[in-house]
Image: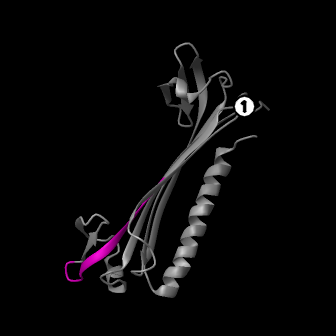
């Protein structure tokens, strides 16, 4: 199985967007707010030097700056990496905030994690993604000060100023707020480009 991190990260983005599009459609139908912020950063570098004994790899970025990394044994074998190979690293971070009615979702915390690696003998590649969701109850709303007090499942209260305070007019005490934080890091090593 040839593992392409760009495809995996793109797939993760599509899943996030489709989930948020479904949530946005539901939010519009219910007139409940839904906000999502996502950032994707891609870094490309060329393998400049490899010391397999000390497990050090030097990468040179497009701007010409070199950085040396010491890799632990969990990073896998370095046998498939050659000087001149291209390393691509994708980093995705996303936060989604959705409001639900009081009986539509249960308060609490949930977490999921996914790790995918290339097969032995292939160029190294991998993806680690994690998602944590917290569901809290709106305990109080202060429109004048643009603050909302949230209550966790265990009864702890926290008062915050929302990033979009205009949404406070669209919620009510007793509504549920689901805050989902997603982070994914993927990397792939591809053969050095053929010289033309």
Q: Is residue 138 magenta?
A: yes
Characterize the magenta stretch by its predominant secondary structure.
strand
Residue 88 position, x and y percent, is 60, 40
Q: Is residue 118 left or right of residue 91?
A: right
Which type of secondary structure does the marked residue at label 1 adopt?
Answer: loop
Quarter of the image where the C terminus is located: top right
| Residue at x 49%, y 81% (from the top left corner) | 27
Residue 51 position, x and y percent, is 56, 16
Please give the residue where the numbered disc 1 appears in the rendered image. Answer: 122
Residue 63 vs residue 177, the one in the foreground? 177
Residue 56 position, x and y percent, is 52, 20
Q: Residue furthest right?
A: 196
Task: Please identify the quarter of the rendering in which residue 144 is found.
Answer: bottom left
What range of the chain is rendered magenta?
131-145
Examine the rendered structure and indicate whether residue 62 appears above or below residue 162. Answer: above
Q: Residue furthest left?
A: 145
């Amino acid at each position: 199985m040839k593992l392409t991190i760009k495809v995996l990260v793109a797939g993760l983005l599509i899943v996030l967007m489709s989930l948020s599009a479904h949530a946005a459609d539901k939010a519009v139908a219910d007139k409940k707010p839904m906000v999502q912020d996502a950032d994707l950063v891609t870094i490309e570098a060329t393998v400049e030097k490899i010391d397999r004994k000390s497990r050090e790899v030097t990468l040179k970025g497009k701007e010409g700056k070199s950085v040396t990394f010491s890799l632990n044994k969990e990073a896998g074998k370095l046998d498939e990496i050659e000087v001149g190979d291209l390393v691509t690293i994708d980093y995705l971070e996303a936060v989604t905030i959705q409001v639900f009615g009081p009986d539509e979702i249960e308060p609490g915390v949930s977490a999921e994690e996914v790790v995918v690696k290339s097969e032995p003998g292939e160029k190294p590649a991998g993806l680690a993604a994690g998602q944590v969701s917290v569901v809290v109850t709106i305990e109080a709303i202060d429109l004048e000060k643009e603050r909302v007090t949230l209550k966790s499942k265990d009864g702890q209260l926290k008062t915050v100023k929302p990033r979009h305070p205009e949404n406070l007019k669209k919620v009510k005490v007793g509504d549920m707020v689901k805050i989902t934080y997603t982070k994914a890091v993927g990397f792939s090593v591809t053969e050095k480009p053929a010289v033309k």
